[in-house]
Amino acid sequence: MMIRRSSPSRRCGVATVEAAVVLSLLLVPVLLGVWEVGRLIYVQQVVTNAAREGARLAAQGRIVNRLGTPTAIAFSTGTPNVKDTVYQALITGGLSNLAQTDVTVKFAFDNDTLTASPSYNPSDGTKNQRFRVYVEIPFSKVRWITVGLVNPTIVSYTVDWQMLVDDAFTVNSDLPQW
């Protein structure tokens, strides 16, 4: 009985081509998914940091500016304000595609309803009063790829903080006499 063997030159590249096709159908979507989830985690960390920066500023209530005069910290107008601080933290964190109108920042004392235009400012807070800062951005403005494997619409974070306003004090302006 004669055994016939096929020539190795006719089949040597078939396994390589099959492996390339199968791996491209499996590996490429997995790699794109890992890349997109990694970007989502990164964006969440930047938003978290921005909310904390806004809360850190708001917790002071009032600051002394470069000229030595006390300055009240506002929510969205004036300098300094919480909304601009959050936006700058987002830009510094690498989310430079965002416009200021894309960023939603909300503020509330204690158990009040979070609102994007509160009738009060952080400077109205009292020592140890609790407050909340909420930051939200659309993920579509900061994503790298639009394959749609991970499809959140927004990325948001809420931080709870306490006012660190100093107790009121008076300075005795009378100098001692000897």
Image (cartoon, rainbow, N blue to C red):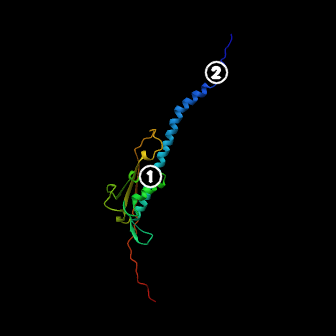
Name the mark nearer the viewer: 2 or 1. Answer: 2
CA distance for labels 2 and 1: 57 Å
Which quadrant of the structure image shows residue 50? bottom left
Describe the element under mark 1 as helix, strand or loop: helix
Earlier along the polypeptide chain: callout 2 or callout 1? 2
Q: Position of residue 138 (x, y in %)?
A: 40, 47
What residue is at 60 percent from the left and 28 percent from the top? 16
In the displayed image of the protein, which residue is found farthest to the left?
119
What is the residue that sits farthest to the right in this orientation? 2
Please give the name of the residue rendered at 40% of the width and 59% of the height, measured from the top-left corner: 82
Determine whether the residue tagged by mark 2 lies in a helix, strand or loop. helix
Would you name the residue on which mark 2 appears? 10
Which residue, as the protein is rendered here, is positioned at the far bottom? 178
Tell me, yes or no, if residue 17 can be seen here: yes
17 lies above or below 48: above
Q: Is residue 96 above or below residue 79?
A: above
Q: Estimate the x, y position of residue 129 in percent, counting from the top left.
A: 36, 62
Q: Residues within 10 Å of mark 1 (few under 14, many from 20)?
A: many
Disc marking residue 17:
none
Instruction: Please name the residue that numbered disc 1 is placed on.
Output: 47
Q: Nearer the viewer, residue 117 or 125?
A: 117
Give amino acid for label 2. Arg
